[in-house]
Image: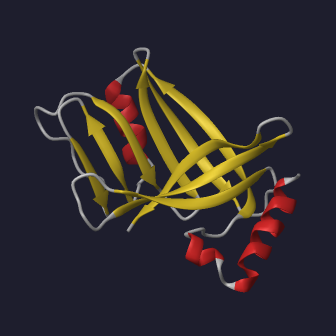
């Protein structure tokens, strides 16, 4: 089955109004463009993150983690090196930063709602340290003839 066929079948499940009772959201087809940059220097990685002007996300340093909405917070003294981050730049644009093998890898995601390569849905995860806030993710599923729907990407799209 192609992503567009699965999205149509998923929509038919909701025609009787029962899908919401099952806790399922909606599914649609979309594309996703990715660009990767690699940094050897943590200051350069931080500069790239700051330069993107994210409006929401989370940051994990060696000694603390935090989330933000609005402006990107400044690093606090004693927090150590930035190890990972996810940030939302716009409705269609997100970033992920990871420290791997001595380098910082920044992935820029650009959602294409007109694309048909993936089946997409959205999910929420409880935000650490809060009881009423959630991280919102868009998941991208690749359809494989042998394995079925395989989650390929999960991209932060907001905090509620």
Asked whether 76 or 6 is in front, the reply is: 6
Q: Measured from the top left, where is residue 134 in percent x and y? A: 37, 62
Q: Measured from the top left, where is residue 26 in percent x and y? A: 66, 69
**Residue 10, above or below 85:** below
Q: Residue at x 70, y 48 (%)?
A: 141
Q: Residue at x 62, y 38 (%)?
A: 35
Counting labels gives 0
Q: Measured from the top left, where is residue 69 in percent x and y? A: 32, 62
Q: Residue at x 78, y 64 (%)?
A: 7
Q: Residue 143: which quarter of the image?
A: top right
Q: Measured from the top left, where is residue 140 in percent x and y? A: 66, 50
**Furthest residue toward top:** 101
Q: Residue at x 25, y 28 (%)?
A: 81
**Residue 5, above or below 109:** below
Left/right placement of residue 18 relative to residue 6 reads left
**Furthest residue toward bottom:** 16
**Residue 2, above or below 132:** above
Left/right placement of residue 119 relative to residue 101 reads right
Asked whether 96 or 71 is in front, the reply is: 96
**Furthest residue toward left:** 78
Left/right placement of residue 40 relative to residue 108 reads left
Q: How is the image coloured?
A: secondary structure
Name the quadrant of the C terminus.
bottom left
């Amino acid at each position: 089955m192609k992503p567009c066929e699965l999205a149509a079948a998923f929509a038919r499940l909701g025609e009787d109004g029962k899908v919401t009772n099952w806790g399922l959201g909606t599914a649609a087809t979309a594309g996703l463009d990715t660009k990767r940059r690699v940094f050897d220097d943590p200051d350069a990685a931080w500069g790239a993150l700051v330069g993107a002007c994210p409006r929401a996300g989370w940051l994990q340093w060696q000694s603390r983690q935090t989330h933000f909405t609005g402006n990107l917070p400044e690093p606090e003294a004693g927090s150590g090196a930035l190890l990972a981050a996810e940030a939302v730049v716009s409705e269609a644009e997100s970033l992920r930063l990871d420290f791997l093998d001595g380098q910082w890898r920044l992935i820029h995601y650009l959602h294409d709602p007109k694309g048909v390569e993936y089946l997409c849905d959205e999910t929420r995860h409880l935000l650490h340290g809060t009881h009423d806030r959630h991280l919102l993710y868009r998941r991208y599923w690749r359809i494989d003839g042998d394995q079925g729907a395989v989650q390929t990407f999960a991209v932060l799209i907001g905090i509620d």
